[in-house]
Amino acid sequence: MNEESSSSSPPPPPEDDDETNQTYYRPDLPNSIYALVKKLWTLLVRKDRGYLRVADFVRLGQAMSEEKPTVASAEFMLEQANISGTGRVDRDEWMGYCERLKRMPEELGIAQLTAFIARLETINAKELRALEQIAKKGDMAEAREEEAMEREIQRMVNASQGKSR
C-alpha cells in the first residue's frame, strides 16, 4: 500500500473484543496480518494484565531473532511502541506499533509473524515447563514438611500418652 492511498482512506473502525466487551483500536492492516498480530499479542501478554513490559519485549526479540536480546534492545522496542509514556504498552499502542507492517508485502508479513508466533509458543512452553518443575519441587518439599510434622505430632501424642499411664 502506498502513502497516498493510506492517507486518503478513512481509518478502520474500532473493534469490539467478544471476550471482554471492550473496544480496541483496529489498525489498517490486511485481515490475515491483523489476525496474526492479535495472536502475537495474546502470546506476549501474561496473566491477563492487559499490557506489555520490557520482559515481554525480551521474549518478542528472542522470537524474532532466535537469540535473547539485550534489555536495552527490549527497552528500545518498548519505547517505540509506548506512545503514552507509561513505561508499558497497552493493546491499542501494540496495534498502532504493528501498523507499520502494512508497508511490508502481505505474504512476507504472514511468513514472519507465523514464524515469530511458533517461536514464542516454544519459548512459552519452555518457561511453563520450568515453572512446573519449580512447582513440583515446591510440592515435594511441602509433602516432606507435612510428613515431618505428622511424625512430630505422632511423637508428641505418644509421649503424652506415656506420661498419662
Image (cartoon, grey):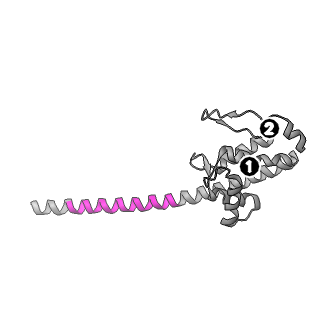
Report whether 135 appears left or right of 8: left
Q: Quadrant of residue 142?
A: bottom left
Label 2 with label 1: CB-CB less than 8 Å: no
Residue 105 tag number: none
Which residue is tagged 2? 31
Residue in the foreground of this view, choosing between 99 and 149: 99
Q: Quadrant of residue 17?
A: top right
- Which contiguous range is marked in magenta? 134-156
Residue in the foreground of this view, choosing between 132 and 40: 40
The percent coordinates of residue 128 (x first, y second) are: 59, 55
The percent coordinates of residue 77 (x first, y second) are: 71, 58
In the rendered image of this protein, does residue 38 appear above or below residue 125?
Answer: above
Q: CA distance from mark 2 to mark 1?
A: 16 Å
The percent coordinates of residue 121 (x first, y second) are: 69, 52
In the picture, the quarter occupied by the C terminus is: bottom left
| Amino acid type indicated by mark 2 | Asn
Taking the spot 67% from the left edge, 61% from the top edge, the residue there is 75
| Amino acid type indicated by mark 1 | Tyr
Which sits earlier in the primary sequence, circle 2 or circle 1? 2
The percent coordinates of residue 60 (x first, y second) are: 70, 56
Q: Is residue 159 visible?
A: yes
Instruction: Characterize the magenta stretch by its predominant secondary structure.
Output: helix
Report whether 62 appears left or right of 139: right
Report whether 19 appears left or right of 136: right
Whether residue 64 appears in magenta in the rendering, the answer is no
Which residue is tagged 1? 97
